[in-house]
């Protein structure tokens, strides 16, 4: 069973870049953009996260927190983030429990490129799960979703 628009976002706490631990609950009160991506240092994922990082001011201008989530280790995330200068955390869901909770595992239990906008009350207001992850959701679409959630 997958969560979708109007559902309560599954809570989680995961380790992430910089040796910190991140939970959805710590961002309660403001919107959160959950970016599930298949892998560090892969072409489309790199392009996607760089695009979000380049336009991060559009998210922060709406008091929205971007969180990248994949199944690689914190060490992999730290190297990836340092290489590209990401200014938002990358979280390590190595056991795929958060991926399962959000219904973003596809064929052969592989992660699907997916994005969720969660409002300040913890309700999912936007959900997109890619069938084929060769493209990603543009910043303006996510910004519009954040504005719609207000």
Image: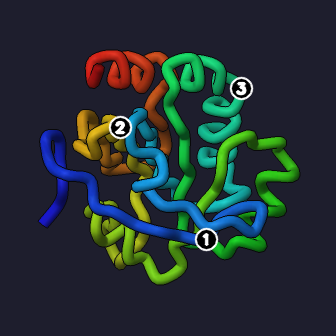
User: Residue beneath label 3, please?
Assistant: 54
Q: Position of residue 30 (x, y in %)?
A: 42, 34
Q: How is the image coloured?
A: rainbow
In the depicted structure, whether residue 143 falls above or below residue 112: above
For the image, the number of numbered tags is 3
Secondary element type, mark 1: strand
Q: Nearer the viewer, residue 86 or 62?
A: 62
For residue 141, the mark is none
User: Residue beneath label 1, please?
Assistant: 15
Between disc 3 and disc 1, the foreground one is: 1
Q: For mark 1, does the 10 Å Cα neighbourhood hold few (<14), some (14 to 19), or many (20 or more) residues?
A: some
Between disc 2 and disc 3, the foreground one is: 2
Who's the residue at 77% across and 62% down the image? 18
Q: What is the quadrant of the N terminus in the image?
A: bottom left
Q: Position of residue 41 (x, y in %)?
A: 73, 57
For residue 117, the mark is 2
Who's the residue at 61% across and 45% down the image? 44
Q: Position of residue 15 (x, y in %)?
A: 61, 71
In the rendered image, which quarter is residue 123 located in? top left
From the viewer's perspective, is 88 left or right of 98? right
In the depicted structure, whether residue 63 falls above or below residue 109: above
Q: Nearer the viewer, residue 76 or 26?
A: 26
Cα–Cα gap, marks 1 and 2: 20 Å
Q: Position of residue 89 (x, y in %)?
A: 65, 51
């Amino acid at each position: 069973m997958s969560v979708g628009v109007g559902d309560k976002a599954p809570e989680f706490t995961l380790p992430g870049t910089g040796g910190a631990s991140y939970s959805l609950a710590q961002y309660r009160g403001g919107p959160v953009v959950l970016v599930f991506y298949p892998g560090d240092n892969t072409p489309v994922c790199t392009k996607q996260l760089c695009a979000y990082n380049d336009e991060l001011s559009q998210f922060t201008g709406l008091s929205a927190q971007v969180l990248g989530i994949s199944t690689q280790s914190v060490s992999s995330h730290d190297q990836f983030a340092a290489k590209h200068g990401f200014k938002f955390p990358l979280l390590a869901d190595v056991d795929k429990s958060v991926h399962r909770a959000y219904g973003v595992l596809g064929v052969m239990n592989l992660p699907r490129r997916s994005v969720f906008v969660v409002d300040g009350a913890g309700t999912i207001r936007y959900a997109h799960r890619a069938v084929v992850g060769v493209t990603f959701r543009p910043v303006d679409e996510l910004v519009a979703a954040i504005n719609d959630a207000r």
